[in-house]
Amino acid sequence: MTRHELTRFPLIKALLKNRWPQLAVYAALLAGFIFAIFAGFVGSPVGNHNFSIVFVWIAWWAMLILAAVPFFGRGWCAVCPIPLPGEWLQRGAILELAPTGKGVSLGRRWPNPLRNIWMQNISFTLVALFSSVILTMPLITAVVLSAMFFLAIGSSMVFERRAFCRYLCPVGGFIGLYSQIAPLELRVKTTRACASCKEKPCYHGSEAGYGCPWQVFPGGLQKNSYCGLCMECLRTCPVDNIAVNLRPFSSDLATPTKRLDEAFKAFIMVGAALIYAGVLLGPWGALKDAAYRIGSGVWFAYVGVFLSVLFVLMPSLYALAVKAGMLLAKTSSAVRPAFAAMSAALVPLGLMFWVAFSLGFVFTNATYILAALSDPLGWGWNLFGTANIPWQPLFTGLLAPLQTLVLIAGMLWSAETAQKVASAAGVRPLPVIIYCLLATLVMLGLLL
Amino acid sequence: MKSAMIFRLLMLAGGLALALLPSFAQAAPPVERVFRIEASSFAYKPGQIQLNLGDRVTLELVSMDVVHGLYLDGYDLSLTADPGQTARLTFVADRAGSFRFRCNVTCGAMHPFMIGKLTVGPNHSFTLAAGLTISAIAIFLLIHPRRASQ
Ligand code: SF4
Ligand code: SF4
Ligand code: SF4
Ligand SMILES: [Cu+2]
């Protein structure tokens, strides 16, 4: 497989290694993040006239799912402002390197039973269940953003490194899942150099930088999921053994997961995209009502259906498809490892579902971005003269063809992935491919 | 082996048929139609409208609570109805496929998701997309039969 080392270029390397460019982006995004919380609390309660909704759920979301995740993997996490205050407190420093012991964290180890992404699966599902109000009401968005902010600070105060990012963040879970697809990776150049490296400053830290905040040993990196691309190891490695590479798409899926928490992440994401497409973008008023009237009987019914689809229906049908594939291949090993491995096929499928779903509301609501830029709090300001730009859906004629293309690409990509991982998993991929095809047809039916 | 091949070819044929045949379907003759759509936060009733290509349609939008509107994707048409009032819009349904219509007046929290669906002719957007998806996967399996059956 061909890889091109980007850090070979001195300019790129210098930009990544230096702390200043990163700090500048951090500062800007942290300001934006705090402003979003502020706007949510004090600005107009009308979502489409409030910075918090428009910039978080339209602008940031579009950037994240249409560009950052597919092309840069955890690129967003490299600049994300949420864990910064906690991390700065934990280190006792913002820019310069602090002598160890200056920070104010208890530095506990994250408990072993929670060293997986089940908590992230749960936190994402919770956000998803309340999405109709989170996505539309500035106050609720502000509450959710603040909760993430303080949870991140709290985690840094009690635990070592970035516990929030690794184990709690609802966004971080799916970014990690889909970062396997990105044509970008951070890896060591040779594992031989690491074997003879005694101090392992990339993990433990040194005068040159901090030990991996994401609790990853770069020398052992096999996939993108848990490397936050923070570039500390690029700074600390004494023998210049860290590289940022351009690589073929979805390289990480060649070695699929063995873990059920990661496999379920894939189901949760595919299922949530299907349900959102039906509820939020579909023509069924009763469904919207059920999703919106939180606490009512219909809402609990909605929650029941939501959870059953994500955690029971989709995984059990998939297990049946995997089992059928095993029967076809005449293998008689356990279903569970094959099920986990074959969940790789759902990674490109799910990402493309999310792209298709997001196209469905990003372009129709994009004009709100310009208006909210001039009037971020919905108070009648007109900072840049764009406050009164009328709402106008963009590219509505292109929407259906684009969504179709995206979903066909996702289908083919997942079929290819299924074929790639099938023989190692001891299954024939056809039943899984048919499952992905049926899911794609349902998604098309909901969107078109 | 042979049956697998036949299965894939049948799948391809089925996909292509689904993608292409609806365009040759005998269209019903165009007629005049009037639809009354009740808009209330945050839904249209009916939420789905079915037309034939060439129909001359009048949409009567009645707002049941606050001000609502309707913007029709693909046709770039819009109208607004004040509470208790009826707004009318007449147009010729000369584009086949399915089109979303959405509220164009901010009417509350779920406003951006106040969406209905207008289908002109058989749902061409869907049959074409589904047919292409099935054909694409059939072609894929024909090209990579080895890997699929190893
Ligand atoms: S895991 Fe979450 S909080 Fe952490 S950097 Fe990524 S998006 Fe930000
Ligand atoms: S510091 Fe460099 S050489 Fe040493 S273990 Fe880390 S990546 Fe490998
Ligand atoms: S230190 Fe290196 S391995 Fe760890 S998160 Fe940062 S970039 Fe990734
Ligand atoms: Cu509205």
Image (cartoon, coloured by chain):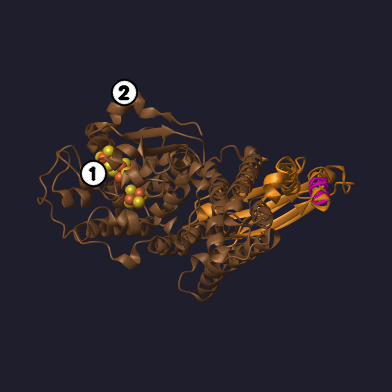
Q: Is residue A161 left or right of residue A183?
A: left
Is residue B7 inside the magenta stretch?
A: yes
| Label 1 residue SS | loop
Identify which residue is drawn at 27% across, 60% down.
A151
Tell me the brown chain.
Answer: A
Identify which residue is drawn at 11% across, 48% down.
A100
Query: Would you place residue A190 above or below residue A164 in this image?
Result: above
Specify start and end residues of the magenta stretch as a single range. B6-14
Residue at the spot of label 2: A11
Q: Residues within 10 Å of mark 2 (few under 14, many from 20)?
A: few
Residue at the spot of label 1: A200
Residue A157 position within the rendered picture, expressed as x and y whole percent measured from the top left = 19, 58
Which numbered disc, 1 or 2, marks the residue that appears first in the sequence? 2
Q: CA distance from mark 1 to mark 2?
A: 26 Å
Residue A308 position within the rendered picture, expressed as x and y whole percent measured from the top left = 55, 70
Q: Residues within 10 Å of mark 1 (few under 14, many from 20)?
A: many
Residue A230 seen in render: no
Is residue A40 inside the magenta stretch?
A: no
Choose between B137 and B115: the one closer to the eye. B137
